[in-house]
Image (cartoon, helix red, strand yellow):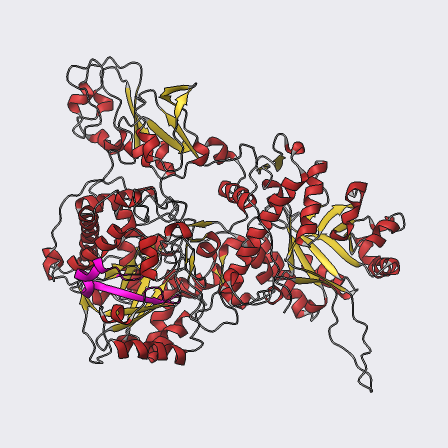
């Protein structure tokens, strides 16, 4: 599958207004001459037929200060100097250090258009966290060979063991993170899977069962075996090409999952073979695993049940994550998926998100080098997740040593998540993404969501290809471990 | 197996306007269509301004959870949201505005704060923010954390311990062991100098009783009404006034003295004097000034049982010389701990650390750095709606009407806060696979320090090799 064959269609926001970056103020000096309405091509100012007043400015449509260079800039055009443009205080309530308002807005634009934003006033590639990816920059060479974008491959193989199991190749080095049915709505889950099929990549069921509605996308689904074993049955293992053992997750390293009673609706309970309305805990860790040998026993069991499937092992990022990765290699895993402490989409204790386990940036380097020293790096696929927010984060993760990445929050933001963080409270997500509430979960349909995700994946792929072109590379596989192509804004002075 | 320690939390709201983060304003172009009431699931928007159901009331922004639904769906774009001014003004660079909201909420419901969508703060920060705790994927002694079957003990011991035991030729113990006191959480309340309303003071004492920990109060604040709970109070007594306070000292389990050079000279005789009154533990309170570790070491050598190192309320050392950068708690505690380890006396004394313990995570982190337990003050006051401002200087503003709160409510809110902190401590310990809080002490190998890992990873990769000039 070639990324260039993916169909991009504009898919606008579901809401009437978007979150404005600027505020356009019209003072009392306005004489309602409607010059502004005539000159603004973005539709900020509007005067309805037959009305004698211009309507209040529609802030979110304004492109901001960079408009000053245009000869239609309303502030200059207004004969009474009644208009002014400023930063909107509302913008400060959107986003945070890791996902800035610009990054969220940028991702929304990608999901809407399928391309990186054309606006130059958004810093959407790096966040404001002051560390990790946010301090790394690419060192693009001044001259590079001209490579046509259609010649650049973003494919990566997932099975490098040559063990006769499925030789799976994904067309873009990203796939969707595990979000269980129960934690997100069915339309979210199905659209993630549909998008994975469009992009010839994967999505993951998380720990919460395997809804029948995913059947058309079975070849692009990873099913998870986690500590609670919710919804794990022989036939679910046999349906897929990749089975993932989840030992831990970045959102709450070392803690079990917890689905609140309110979210355990009838359909969720049936899927998980549990009692409706009761909170469901996944214990931590696997009660049958005390060693790498026990772990191997688990992997052998899955391999026996599904002779073609690849095995992925998802772990968090403790001090000894490198040792765990090598152990997983010896136990027979194909993919080691490391999930950094700052990531995650699901509800988790704040204390765990902030404090437990190291950020992914350090862990990638650690694991990549350790596997290399052990002489097994070529036989493992190293997937990073937990804080991969943008295409630039993805490319930096690959430079640090990952083969590809798993994303969760970026997918949610494409579906217009505002990262308010109230996924778990009461009826769940107010925006209908992470909710099984009958009213809220109907806020968007699968078609809308699939196209938004496809568009966002497209924009990322466009950016990744541009980065590879600038480095003169024909395949994303050439980028793996190339830390020499990065610089750090503190150290590389 | 000992009975599992459990903190009974109970939802206890306060009828009081505290800090909230978002402020929503309804513009004049609102057409009172009521769309916002339909889309908001948090009941911010309601009809009935001035009793008129045709008009929309002012938004009740206290309950706003920042979902943007009303903002984005208002047909006229008439709603505006911003960060609330009070929110932006409260606290300062250490006591961040968000802390007030989370502490307030924990005091109300006693629950571990939980949110979705990953971490949202800065990558790293000064002091405790520059460290992560470790976790264990597979092999670990504990199971299930707070929901579990296995017991994770958070209790710690206060008192002096022997370096080793001595037996005689008949294998009889010759050493005289010291008395120690166990408390079930590694937290004591520390209020020797704050002027507290009577009901607040009593509430704090009752909370200490309920949790079975201690509250440190000035001897003169121990009024007759709290005398009955004196077993959970540690009075701070001027060491020259031991004789005048004999009755009080006899009735308590531990007594504290403020450090000065004079005290250091006469510490052995002071301890002896106290021990004559009963088997009572002694604590020396010492400000965390530069090189405090040397003083702590000397005190340990001359028989101090418990040493309470007190940093500034923002978690920095005290009295730093002009122009110098003050050390942060994290490094002060590590210095004290390592000095005592180097001198081979660490196990003999108990170290309490206080100053800047503001969030649940600070407790395990202070312990990992080398404290046996921590002392807290300001979070308990924030639980009652107290506002703190760091600039231009530390100001505590107690909530209006605080003196009318019932002792029961005050106590329950503090118990709730500690219940939430205790659960969070269990989360951290469970993830680390540590079964006993006393084993957290000094376990820096189970923590990840920002400076170290960043230099080891990015420093190694990206630092330009310096040219050496001979």
Residue found at x 39% / y 72%: A322
Q: Residue furthest bottom?
A: B169
Residue B207 is situated, as x and y percent measured from the top left of the image, at 67, 47
Q: Closest to the observer: B428 or A444? A: A444
Residue A5 is situated, as x and y percent measured from the top left of the image, at 9, 56
Residue B248 is situated, as x and y percent measured from the top left of the image, at 84, 49
Can see residue B463? no
Is A225 in the magenta?
yes
Is A5 in the magenta?
no
Q: Closest to the observer: B380 or B122? A: B380
Q: Please report the bounds of the magenta region as a residue range.
A: A204-231
Residue found at x 29% / y 42%: A439
Q: Closest to the observer: A276 or B349? A: A276
Relative to residue A57, is residue B414 drawn left or right? right
Residue B356, placed above or below residue A366: above
Residue B101, placed above or below residue B426: above
Residue A468, placed above or below residue B344: above
Viewport quadrant of the N terminus of chain A: bottom left
Q: Closest to the observer: A283 or B260? A: A283
Viewport quadrant of the C terminus of chain A: bottom left
Can see residue B457? yes
Quadrant in the rendering for residue A296: bottom left
């Amino acid at each position: 599958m070639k990324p260039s064959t993916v169909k991009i269609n504009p898919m606008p926001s579901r809401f009437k207004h978007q979150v404005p970056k600027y505020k356009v103020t019209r003072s009392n000096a306005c004489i309602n001459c409607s010059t502004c309405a005539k000159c603004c091509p973005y539709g900020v100012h509007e005067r309805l037929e037959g009305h004698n007043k211009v309507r209040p400015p529609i802030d979110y449509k304004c492109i901001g200060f960079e408009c000053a260079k245009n000869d239609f800039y309303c502030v200059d055009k207004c004969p009474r100097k009644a208009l002014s443009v400023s930063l909107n205080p509302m913008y400060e309530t959107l986003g945070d250090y890791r996902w800035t308002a610009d990054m969220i807005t940028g991702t929304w634009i990608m999901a809407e258009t399928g391309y990186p934003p054309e606006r130059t006033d958004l810093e959407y590639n790096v966040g404001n966290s002051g560390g990790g990816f946010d301090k790394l920059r690419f060192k693009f060479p001044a001259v590079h060979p001209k490579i046509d974008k259609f010649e650049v491959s973003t494919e990566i193989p997932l099975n490098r063991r040559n063990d006769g199991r499925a030789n799976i190749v994904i067309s873009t080095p990203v796939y969707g993170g595990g979000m269980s049915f129960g934690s997100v709505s069915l339309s979210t889950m199905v659209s993630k899977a549909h998008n994975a099929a469009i992009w010839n990549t994967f999505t993951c069921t998380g720990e919460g069962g395997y809804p029948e509605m995913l059947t058309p996308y079975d070849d692009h689904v990873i099913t998870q075996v986690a500590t609670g074993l919710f919804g794990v049955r022989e036939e679910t293992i046999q349906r897929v090409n990749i089975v993932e053992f989840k030992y831990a997750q970045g959102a709450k390293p070392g803690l079990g999952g917890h689905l609140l009673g309110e979210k355990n609706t009838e359909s969720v309970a049936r899927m998980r073979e549990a009692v409706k309305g009761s909170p469901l805990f996944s214990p931590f860790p696997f009660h049958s695993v005390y060693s790498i040998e026990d772990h191997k026993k688990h992997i052998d069991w899955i391999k026996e049940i599904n002779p073609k499937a690849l095995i992925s092992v998802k772990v968090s990022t403790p001090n000894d994550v490198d040792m765990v990765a090598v152990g997983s290699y010896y136990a027979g895993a194909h993919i080691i998926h490391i999930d950094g402490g700052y990531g995650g989409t699901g509800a988790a204790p704040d204390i765990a998100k902030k404090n437990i386990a190291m950020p992914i940036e350090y862990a990638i380097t650690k694991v990549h080098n350790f596997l290399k020293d052990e002489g097994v790096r070529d036989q493992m696929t190293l997937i990073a997740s937990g804080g991969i927010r943008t295409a630039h984060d993805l490319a930096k993760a690959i430079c640090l040593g990952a083969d590809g990445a798993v994303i969760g929050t970026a997918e949610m933001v494409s579906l217009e998540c505002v990262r308010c963080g109230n996924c778990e409270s009461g009826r769940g997500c107010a925006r209908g993404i992470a909710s099984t509430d009958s009213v809220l979960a109907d806020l968007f349909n699968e078609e809308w969501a699939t196209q938004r995700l496809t568009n966002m994946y497209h924009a990322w792929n466009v950016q990744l290809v541009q980065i590879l072109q600038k480095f003169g590379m024909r395949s994303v596989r050439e980028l793996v471990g190339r830390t020499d192509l990065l610089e750090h804004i503190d150290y590389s002075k | 197996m000992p009975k599992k320690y459990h903190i009974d939390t109970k939802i206890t709201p306060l009828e009081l306007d505290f800090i909230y983060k978002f402020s929503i304003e309804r513009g004049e172009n609102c057409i009172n269509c009521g769309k916002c009431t339909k889309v908001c699931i948090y009941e911010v928007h309601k009809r009935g301004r001035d009793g008129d159901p045709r008009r929309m009331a002012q938004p009740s922004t206290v309950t706003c959870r920042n979902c943007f639904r009303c903002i984005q769906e208002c047909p006229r774009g008439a709603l505006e949201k911003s960060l609330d001014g009070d929110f932006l003004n409260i606290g300062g660079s250490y006591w961040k505005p968000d802390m007030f909201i989370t502490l307030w909420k924990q005091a109300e419901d006693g629950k571990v704060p939980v949110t979705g969508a990953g971490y949202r703060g800065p990558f790293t920060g000064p002091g405790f923010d520059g460290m992560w705790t470790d976790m264990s994927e597979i092999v670990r002694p504990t199971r299930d954390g707070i929901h579990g079957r296995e017991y994770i003990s958070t209790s710690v011991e206060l008192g002096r311990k022997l370096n080793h035991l001595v037996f005689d030729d008949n294998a009889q113990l010759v050493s005289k062991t010291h008395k120690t006191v166990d408390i079930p959480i590694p937290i004591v309340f520390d209020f020797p100098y704050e002027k507290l309303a009577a009901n607040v003071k009593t509430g704090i004492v009752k909370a200490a009783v309920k949790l079975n920990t201690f509250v440190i109060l000035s001897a003169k604040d121990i009024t007759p009404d709290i005398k009955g709970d004196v077993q959970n109070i540690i009075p701070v007594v001027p060491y020259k006034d031991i004789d005048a306070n004999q009755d009080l000292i006899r009735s308590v389990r531990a007594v504290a003295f403020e450090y000065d050079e004079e005290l250091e000279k006469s510490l052995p005789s002071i301890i002896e004097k106290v021990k004559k009154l009963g088997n009572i533990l002694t604590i020396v309170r010492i400000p965390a000034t530069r090189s405090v570790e040397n003083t702590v070491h000397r005190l340990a050598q001359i028989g101090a049982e418990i040493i309470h190192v007190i940093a500034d309320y923002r978690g920095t050392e005290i009295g730093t010389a002009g122009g110098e950068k003050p050390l942060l708690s994290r490094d002060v505690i590590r210095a004290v701990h390592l000095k005592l380890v180097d001198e081979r006396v660490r196990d003999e004394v108990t170290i309490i650390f206080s100053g800047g313990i503001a969030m649940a995570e600070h407790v395990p982190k202070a312990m990992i750095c080398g404290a046996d337990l921590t002392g807290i003050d300001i979070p308990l006051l924030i639980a009652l709606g107290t506002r703190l401002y760091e600039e231009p200087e530390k100001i505590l503003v107690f909530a209006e009407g605080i003196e009318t709160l019932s002792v029961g409510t005050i106590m329950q809110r503090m118990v709730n806060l500690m219940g939430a902190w205790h659960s969070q401590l269990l989360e951290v310990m469970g993830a680390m696979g540590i079964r006993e809080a006393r084993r957290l002490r000094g376990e820096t190998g189970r923590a990840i320090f920002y400076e170290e890992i960043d230099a080891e990873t990015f420093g190694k990769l990206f630092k330009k090799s310096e040219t050496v000039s001979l």
